[in-house]
Image: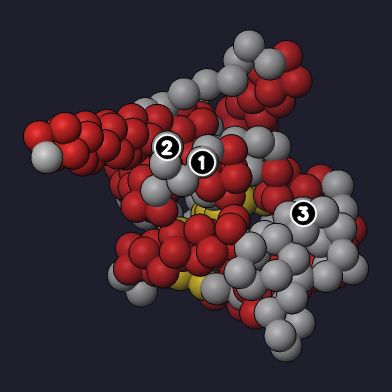
Amino acid sequence: MRNLKTGILLGALALAAGSVLAQSLSTTPTHRMEQEWWKKRFEAKLELVKQGGWELVFMGDSITHGWEGSGKAVWAENFGAYKALNLGYGGDRTEHVLWRLDNGELDGYQPRLLVLMIGTNNTGHRPLEQESPEDTAAGIKAILEKIGQKSPSTKVLLLAIFPRDEKPDGEKRVRNEKVNAMIKGFADGKRVIFMDINKEMLEADGTLTKEMMPDFLHPKEKGYGIWAKAVLPVVKEALGK
């Protein structure tokens, strides 16, 4: 009996330690400067930041980065009239966005609107025992707080993490939806607005098709069109155009 109790206690302590570690990882600013492409992108984006005057910013991971790829034509059509800056980096997690915010990406200007979507790499790159949905949500909350500190006049449009996996019961889909349920509560309807357009990218039965996202993660042009159509009214209201 003593051995059983000891085992249960040790197991509980291990789970607790794993959660603390993950939360520390997701909320501790971390760079990727050892990766040459990432370093070059950060330096290039920082040079753009220094030009100032940016009124619309998209910030996130590879899905946001993709506005320069599959979403390029959609970006030009919908946001080309604005002073718009893409700060998406493939593979970034919440801690990387925090580092970028600490190191100049929101310095010297205060955009009217910042569109934020981040977190799918937290859930996708770390097993559940290392990072819970609560941990990922904590990282997103830290980003919102950092944006508020650095640019208090900026309105943030916080997007639900886009769907992953082909089926609704896919592990990553389920984890992302748990995160989305939590971060929805971070919106106050004033400085932070929450938007969930995931159903518009899914079939009626919740299936994610390859026509929408070939790898069940990154949208094709059609997906970027859905994204642009959804956020454009908020963009127009915030920027007055």
Q: Is residue 28 above or below residue 231?
A: above
Tell me which corner region of the image, top left, top right, bottom left or bottom right, holds residue 174: bottom right
**Disc number lying in front (3 or 2):** 2
For the question of whether residue 39 can be seen, the reply is yes
Q: Secondary structure at mark 1?
A: loop
Query: Which mark identifies residue 127?
Result: 1
Q: Which residue lies at the image location 68% right of the left edge and 49% below the top edge?
A: 64
Residue 30 in the figure: left or right of residue 167: left
Residue type at the position of mark 2: Gln
Q: Is residue 236 visible?
A: no
The residue at the point 44 percent across, 64 percent down is: 178
Residues under labels 3 and 2: Cα distance? 24 Å
Question: From the viewer's perspective, is 83 left or right of 26?
Answer: right
Amino acid type, mark 1: Pro
Q: Are marks 2 and 1 in contact (CB under 8 Å)?
A: yes
- Pinpoint residue 235: horizontal percent, then vertical percent: 60, 68
Q: Position of residue 222 (x, y in %)?
A: 85, 69
Q: From this view, report whether residue 53 is shown above or below residue 200.
A: above
Do tag 1 and tag 3 residues touch (Cβ < 8 Å)?
Answer: no
| Amino acid at pointer 3 | His
Please name the residue shown 42% across and 37% down the image: 130
Q: Going 64% across and 72% down the picture, which residue do you hit?
A: 168
Residue closest to the far left: 2
Classed neighbour count for the residue bearing mark 2: other residues with Cα under 10 Å, few (<14), some (14–19), many (≥20): many
Q: Which residue is mark 3?
A: 218
Q: Which disc, if any, is residue 237?
A: none
Residue matched to label 2: 130
Separation of marks 2 and 1 at Cα, in angstroms: 5 Å
Q: In front: 226, or 82?
A: 226
